[in-house]
Image (spheres, rainbow, N blue to C red):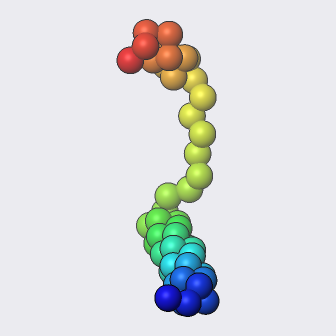
């Protein structure tokens, strides 16, 4: 087998994954979701309790 075929397949797979992630991001944003980080005391409690 030629190593060039594996390189082409790897690049194609990488492009496909990036395109899928971009489409998912655009879909989620179009549904009204936005990035959020909720760093409150409840999160700290979960870590302390080991849950």
Point out the image quarter for the C terminus.
Answer: top left
As displayed, is residue 2 above or below residue 31? below
Q: Position of residue 23 (x, y in %)?
A: 50, 76
In this orientation, does residue 15 appear? no
Q: In this view of the protein, which residue sits in the foreground, 11 or 47?
A: 11
Instruction: Report which quarter residue 12 is drawn in.
Output: bottom right
**Residue drawn where x is 43% and y is 9% of the image:** 49
* Point 54% across, 83% down: residue: 6
Which is nearer the eye, 46 or 14?
A: 14
Side (left or right) of 51 relative to 41? left
Q: Position of residue 7 (x, y in %)?
A: 60, 83
Which corner quadrant of the image does residue 15 belong to? bottom right
- Residue, x 50% and y 17% (percent of image)? 47
Outermost front residue: 1
48 in relation to 13, above or below? above
- The single residue placed furthest to the left in the displayed view is 51
Q: Is residue 40 above or below residue 35?
A: above
Q: Looking at the picture, how far across and down is residue 45, in whole percent?
A: 49, 13
Residue 21 drawn at (x, y percent): 52, 70
Reply above or below: 39 against 6: above
Between 20 and 4, the residue placed more toward the observer is: 4
Q: Residue at x 55, y 90 (%)?
A: 2
Q: Nearer the viewer, residue 32 or 50?
A: 50
Query: How many numbered badges does the structure rendering display?
Result: 0
């Amino acid at each position: 087998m030629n190593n060039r075929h594996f390189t082409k397949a790897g690049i194609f797979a990488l492009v496909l994954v990036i395109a899928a992630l971009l489409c998912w991001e655009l879909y989620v944003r179009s549904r009204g979701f936005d990035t959020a980080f909720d760093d409150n005391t409840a999160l700290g409690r979960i870590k302390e309790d080991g849950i």
